[in-house]
Image (cartoon, rainbow, N blue to C red):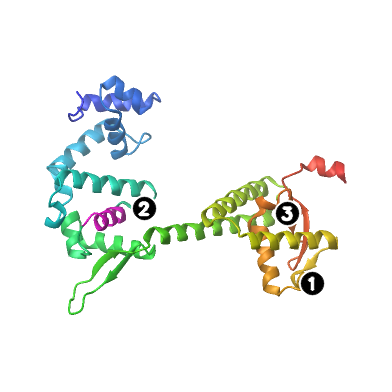
Amino acid sequence: MPGGRLTHEERRLIGAGLADGLGYAEIARQLDRPTSTVSREVTRNGGPRSYRPDHAHHATAYRARRRPSAASGWVLGEEDVAGRDPQAVREFAERFAAAMTATGLPRMASRVLARLYTTDSRSLTAAQLVRQLRVSHASVSKAIGYLEQLEMVERGRDPGQRQEHYVIAEDVWLRAWTTSARTTAEMARTASEGTELFDAATPAGARLRQMARFFAQLSDDMSGGPSAAAAEDAATVFAALLHARRPLTAAELAAALEWPLGRVTDALRDAEAFAPFTDPLALDRPTSDTYGVAAAPDRLTEAQRMALR
């Protein structure tokens, strides 16, 4: 009976299907229900590992008493309804919030952001968000604070007005992308430090080396990759170290290449950060202040290295 509420018996069958390892689509076919109905039911009630039929049935009944209709969970302003289907607007805003939640954004922050995006008003105050989302002032305040930390929302106050209002930052997605790119680059740097600490020839070091390469490549993709000039400088530094056939300090490289010291340190940093581009060679650090060139640690096995020695 597609479209109706799930019965207690249907929830028991969903629980049995999950216990048997069945997928949502197979369970839905057995119940003659849409797959989306089964997936929403399970997601709302603990997920596939924690789903309990009896608990889900009672929880659904409680939510129905607490919220007589799904539409009452989101109140729209008059300017947002004019010329539009209110139910369609509400459903879209909730789907939009759910999509952002799926990316890792907290649920309340997602709902606040979705509301700010889908209003025709230039901005919304905390009181308006509380009324329209039917949540507490504390929930809105916490969500706004979180979004401000991510630089996704800005607050302001009109001249002569006491209430603050909140608006979407103009370049919100660029800021979010930049923050994510910085985090990814930091993960790559941290994993690289771990590789040196544990030694890439050990299991722990090899895992960290693989992690460092993955995040370095991801960071590279997010930032558009190293510039041609940066790649050229890194290649020149590698050539200098190969030609010298001995470890050199950054100052010695700068003197030999007749470059400013900052240009050399940037080239050395880029050579480490973009290791996938220099494979099968890798920058070597015999001491904390000297640099050399060696084969990438995970390119040869220990047996191969011993045989070559």
Between 193 and 58, the residue placed more toward the observer is: 193
Q: Measuring 27% from the left and 44% from the top, which residue is drawn there? A: 95
* Residue 252's disc number: 1
* Residue 105's disc number: 2
Q: Please determine whether, in this image, residue 127 is positioned above or below residue 74.
A: below
The amino acid beneath tag 1 is Glu
Q: Measuring 26% from the left and 66% from the top, which residue is drawn there? A: 166
Q: Quadrant of residue 23?
A: top left
Report the predominant secondary structure element of the magenta stretch: helix
Q: Distance between the residues labelled 3 and 1?
A: 19 Å
Q: What stretch is highlighted in magenta?
A: 108-119
Q: Quadrant of residue 151?
A: bottom left
For marks 3 and 1, the one nearer the N-term is 1
For marks 2 and 3, the one nearer the N-term is 2
Q: Measuring 42% from the left and 62% from the top, which residue is drawn there? A: 175
Q: How crowded is mark 3: few (under 14 residues within 10 Å), some or many (20 or more)?
A: many
For marks 2 and 1, the one nearer the N-term is 2
Residue 117 part of the magenta-drawn span: yes
> According to the image, label 3 marks what residue?
282
Q: The N terminus lies in which quarter of the figure? A: top left
